[in-house]
Amino acid sequence: MSEFLERSHTAGTSGAASQAVGRQSIGFTRPPAILGGASVVGSKEGDGPLGHLFDRVNEDPLCGKSTWEQAESEMQRQALALALGKLSLEPGDVRYLFAGDLLGQIIATSFGARDMEIPLFGLYGACSTIGEALQLGAMAVGGGYAGRVACVASSHLGSAEKQFRFPMGYGNQRPLSATWTVTGAGAFILGEGEGYVRITGITTGKIVDYGVKDSMNMGACMAPAAADTIAGNLEDFGREPEDYDRIITGDLGAVGKEILLKLLRERGYDIGRQHTDCGLEIYDRKRQDVHSGGSGCGCAAATLSAYSLDQIAEGHWRRVLFVPTGALLSTVSFNEGESVPGIAHGVVLEG
Amino acid sequence: MSEFLERSHTAGTSGAASQAVGRQSIGFTRPPAILGGASVVGSKEGDGPLGHLFDRVNEDPLCGKSTWEQAESEMQRQALALALGKLSLEPGDVRYLFAGDLLGQIIATSFGARDMEIPLFGLYGACSTIGEALQLGAMAVGGGYAGRVACVASSHLGSAEKQFRFPMGYGNQRPLSATWTVTGAGAFILGEGEGYVRITGITTGKIVDYGVKDSMNMGACMAPAAADTIAGNLEDFGREPEDYDRIITGDLGAVGKEILLKLLRERGYDIGRQHTDCGLEIYDRKRQDVHSGGSGCGCAAATLSAYSLDQIAEGHWRRVLFVPTGALLSTVSFNEGESVPGIAHGVVLEG
């Protein structure tokens, strides 16, 4: 083990652009920039507290297509096209696309990226996917492999409910612990140079399984993974919660938030003042009947683009730990009696 | 576009460890090494021409577990443990795990990696996944982000047929264009330093869709993507087919091979002498009744570990282009009338 740590440390300092930090983190010596981003959502998200901030609200849940899956692909296309357009870029100006979604064989991405003709790294990290994409995208730019890359993730209420629980038409009742899958997509262009927000570090998550078997309580499945990644980040970088102006999880919702705060208190960290959750920001829980809050890859991705990045760029927040959270739920494993493990990927954002 | 190319070029030469080459490739100035690998297969693969080369043959298709999916997870665990063991390493000696499989929400990986406690990047590239994993793993090591990483991919006949076509018990008839999903897994440990084979370059694939809609003819779905990646590699590096001793696709099988050779001839490249396909190497088509050949993430991964790497290490082959091929098939998109797009990821291996 000591030999590994020594090598790992050597790896980070032998003239390379970046640096391995602690057990599971990277601190970029030349931090890649988020040059720009875009968000696309559905009507319910457009009606929520952040509604005026999204770049595009599709009132038609099918986005003019024939199926939920095609609609989700269309939102990925829209988000990436908008992000490129804001920077006056063409798809060919981006060297790699890091993208994923919740569906089996990530079909929203396959068909969403098909016409872009950008070399693709297909990712699956459940609702943490935009964190995984930003981490790998930052590694690609920070390592000198690409001048610019794009990171995209999406979810859609219709395609997700059909995939994981019940088709929409069935009208199934949902317990109060259930979250509402966000219909939305977020796209980000990373590159060298200034940009408006920099990715200064990343903490890659491990699979954490506390044995929760409730597909209607994703927050409880993901909270242990979020706690593990946040604690790992603080330990690797030698920081305290106060070193972040915000610690933003992806989609724990109200139930998962309580568990997260409790688990971190047990490890000696009180993040009560810093913590917020995209799933609690994107909907008005009193008015919009979403039960525990929002969820899905699109929840963290669209909220980051529409809201959080601007807070950092405008100087309201100086340093943020963004931690999208994923529940590794599958109907196959679930119906075979398996638990729902979680994973969470941390990205340090600075103005 | 010219501004991008300039920036991209700058990105590759401004003191970073690696270099963007052409439109979609990277040439590593400090090539990461494959320090070691391991392969685990089922009984049919053990009975094939490469049977004596695999590290472990599981005669029990369930690998002592209760479901096909658990069996596939177990093979991932076995392959990674064997690869680590050969190098006298523990899971904690590896900084990142890049892994994936064919199943919805990559559950073979989620549950296979659960107990390893290695920070995980979950990948989905269909049967090209081991290529995607080796590319990202090489980028992580080459960029100085990690001293060592692991790359793992798997497939299982039982879990794949249940996922994509018919459950095994149904006894469905298969057309001659169909391939046989390999029950197997391959694991590789990448790191800095010498190792026995070096990854000197990579060419990341785009989604290529010729509109093929036959789920029983994966070779035809993937061949256009393989042709695109191979041509891209030759163009980016300014090479001719003769600059490679072998160009090894993942699982095109006999039908896909014909299409690949034809498509590349149309682009001015004759790879007839260099080309081989893991799907044609792993089974004896005359004796084993596998129709067009082998397929699945495990096909390319296990064949690379058991056979191809040794050919390079022993000096029989000097430089190889390894191109795992993926068909982005999903029952949801397929049943909605969509085509099956392909993707292929190229990895340049040298002794």
Image (spheres, coloured by chain):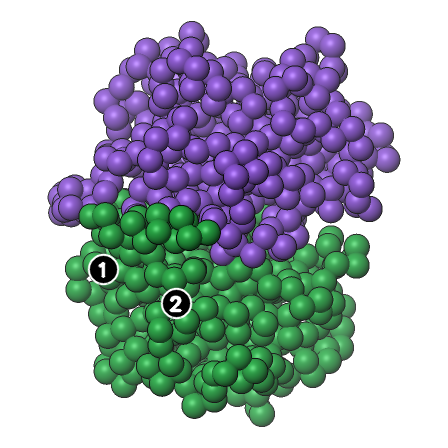
Chain colours: A green, B purple
* Residue at 17% across, 59% down: A193
Q: Secondary structure at mark 2?
A: helix
Q: Say if labels 2 and 1 share a chain.
A: yes
Q: Height in image: A136 above or below B298?
A: below
Residue B41 in the image, given as x and y percentages of width and height:
67, 29
- Whether residue A307 sits left or right of residue B17 in the image: it is right
Q: Within 10 Å of the Cα at label 2, are there few (<14), some (14-19), or many (20+) other Cα atoms?
A: some
Q: Between residue A114 and residue A131, name the one nearer to us.
A: A131
Q: Which mark is residue A236?
A: 2
Instruction: Single out the mark in the foreground, 2 or 1.
Output: 2
Q: Which mark is residue A29?
A: 1
- Chain letter behind tag 1: A
Q: Which mark is residue A165?
A: none
Residue B62 in the image, given as x and y percentages of width and height:
79, 38
* Residue at 60% across, 30% down: B39
Q: Between residue A334 and residue B49, name the one nearer to us.
A: B49
Residue B26 appears in the rendering: yes
- Whether residue A348 sits left or right of residue A195 in the image: it is right
Q: Within 10 Å of the Cα at label 1, are there few (<14), some (14-19), or many (20+) other Cα atoms?
A: some
**Amino acid type, label 2:** Asp
